Image (spheres, rainbow, N blue to C red):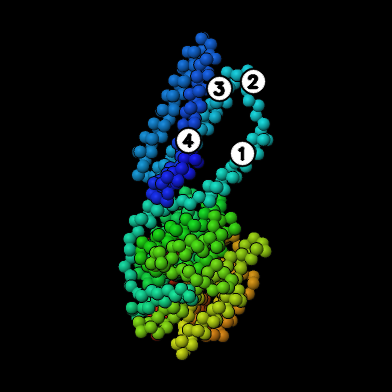
Amino acid sequence: MFVASELSFYFFGNSKSAEFAENFFNNSIVIEIPVFLLIKNILSLKMIRRRINIPDKDKYKKHIIGITIFSAVYWLGVTTFTVIKSKDIAYPGNVFMIAGIFFGLLVIVYDFTLRRKVTFRNIVINKPRIAVYTAVAVAVSGFMVLQQDTWYTQSYINSVPVVEHNTHKIEYNDETGVYTITKTTDDFKILHLTDIHIGGSLYSYRKDIKALKACYAEIEHTHPDLVVVTGDLSFPLGIMSMSLNNTAPVGQFAAFMRNTGIPWAFTYGNHDTESLASANKQELNEVYKSLSFKTSGNLLYPYTQPDVMGRNNQLIEIRNADGTLNTGLFMIDSNAYTGEGINVYDYIHDDQVDWYADEVNRMNAEAGHTVNSMVFFHIPLQEYKTATELYLDGSDEVKYFYGENPGDHGGITNDLVCSSDYPSKMFDTALELGSTTGFFCGHDHYNNASIEYKGIRLTYGMSIDYLAMPGIEKETKQRGAELITIHADSTWESKQIPLESIT
């Protein structure tokens, strides 16, 4: 088969014929195995017939007929069941796969049962060896299955219609990596989504559909000009999501957003590039680039990024119709883990903050005044915790707007605010520059308060998550999004859009 594949390229070259030949030979094992088994069985039956004594031929004939009838009835039953239930089963092919596995187990059990009757000495079972081999086989095959790129949500994604929205001029600078959105309306609306946690597996299929439908409900209700997702779009966490694949969820959500027609931007979360995930941070970065603006027309992911810490740091400039700067939107990577232990969260590093300061100063120099800006990231700064504690103590240093911070709600951590143990100079630098008036993050799932501390609004996004936190699927109060409205004079306001209020 390998030689035939090579010859096809020799004769056909880089053409559709060669592509077809390559695809055929790569998948020919689907034909090779049944043909091999058929030939093996025919030869085995011939050998067996020559060795059977005349008195046993009737038993042999009944044996063959019994197996044939059982197999026919079994697969006819599976086919009938699949046809009857086809409307209720998302992927009928999986029924045959499961039925095939069960059929194989029945064959093995029957084989060992039959051996006892027709052999002088049955197979001696080395239980420890079988246990080791089985464990290795399960581990290897399980790891391979968890890394598979599956698209179970595609049928729903294909049905997603375009959402009515304003059209603004979007430009990209290849040298700086900065996107510019020139507004055609006075107000500019941003929908903030976070912690969507798409698993991308058959196990998570039902919850993935719920998450995508929740996102669509928020988008369809608000008709935003831009969607910003602050991390944990995917959840490649092995047995918790039954998937280690972190590229399929990205492709699925990108296809989903492309169908809505709404431009969107993204910051990384701690789960997007887990250590055992199928794609590392460099590979996932390339996936995002392949799906970005030049391809999709609506994903504002930069092809050029600053040489600082993080998987992606970018600036999106919102300009008025006359070209003047209105607001700068910073997408900053809060990174994932420090590597010093389990769930030791990272933070926004000094070189990232320096890049942010340089961009703020550049915009101010162009505008001739301090330009308003907002910063989006995933893991909250330590100031979120400080401000929350002050608010709970009744301090007048904090101004409350909406929402609540109930902490982990009985989850995997007891922290009220799950920030890094390492301080970042991000907040103090923003205070010093006087440009940023709002920080927006996710990460804590249940926390969704918006409070102002030292003149900067600290807002938790309402999460979408149906999968990651134990029991969160049944919870409703924390699920939703925020709508941020930027006005012509650069002032802004935000409000929560709880999912239960619009569905």
- Toward the viewer: 466 or 203? 203
Outermost residue to the top: 55
Looking at the rendering, which quadrant does residue 222 occupy? Answer: bottom left
Mark closer to the chain start, 3 or 1: 3
Numbered disc in front, either 4 or 2: 4
**Residue 470 in sight:** no
SS label for mark 4: helix
Q: Is residue 118 above or below residue 375?
A: above
Q: Is residue 402 above or below residue 111?
A: below
Q: On the image, numbered disc 3 is attached to which residue?
A: 114
Label 1 – label 4 distance at C-alpha: 25 Å
SS label for mark 3: helix
Mark closer to the chain start, 2 or 3: 3
Residue lying at 40% horizontally and 50% vertically, measured from the top left: 15
Q: On the image, numbered disc 2 is attached to which residue?
A: 121
Mark closer to the chain start, 2 or 1: 2
Q: On the image, numbered disc 4 is attached to which residue?
A: 32
Q: Is residue 257 above or below residue 129?
A: below
Q: Amino acid at mark 1?
A: Thr
Outermost residue to the bottom: 368
